[in-house]
Image (tube, rainbow, N blue to C red):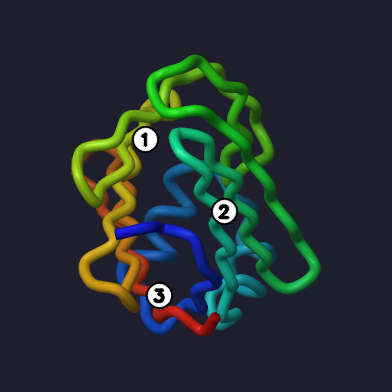
Amino acid sequence: MSFTGKYQLESQEGFVEFMKAVGLPDDMIEKGKDIKSVSEIEENGNQFKVTVTTGSKVLTNSFTIGQEADIETLTGERVKTIVNREGNKLKVVLNRITSITELVDANTLVNTLTLGGLVYKRISKRVA
């Protein structure tokens, strides 16, 4: 299955606790907790471009599977890392955060971020 498409956040678990742990200010957490972000993924072979729009904030990362890339995190920090693919899962470690993005079926994208014992899970549905 191809990741290519546009996905809108449908539900999330653990947002507030996770964002506090990564150091996001309370006012940004409060503003962001009810916004339904949109993720747009372009997959071309092993090359990916991921754009996440949350309100007025747009975060875009481009990478090639298995090659080092400069990735911007949720907090705006840039990290050199390698994104790997295992079937329908994209896995990456950003400092202390492990991110797994899984295409569970043709229309459902699940992103699970783990930091120590904290888990932030986002479930998005394909809209285009």
Q: Which residue position holds label 1?
A: 97
Q: CA distance from mark 3 to mark 2?
A: 16 Å
Counting from the top left corner in percent of width and height, residue 8 is at 51, 78
Q: CA distance from mark 1 to mark 2?
A: 23 Å
Residue 124, label in figure: 3
**69 lies above or below 58:** above
Question: For the residue marked with disc 1, what is the amino acid?
Answer: Ile
The residue at 45%/34% (across/down) is 46
Question: For the residue marked with disc 2, what is the amino acid?
Answer: Glu
Q: Is residue 54 left or right of residue 97?
A: right
Task: Sort mark 1 into few (<14), some (14-19) or many (20+) by Cα contacts within 10 Å.
Answer: some
Please tell me which of labels 1 and 3 falls first in the chain. Answer: 1
Figure quadrant of residue 116: top left
Question: For the residue marked with disc 3, what is the amino acid?
Answer: Ser
Q: Nearer the viewer, residue 54 or 23?
A: 54
Q: Give SS at disc 3.
A: strand
Q: Give SS at disc 2.
A: strand
Q: Which residue position holds label 2?
A: 42
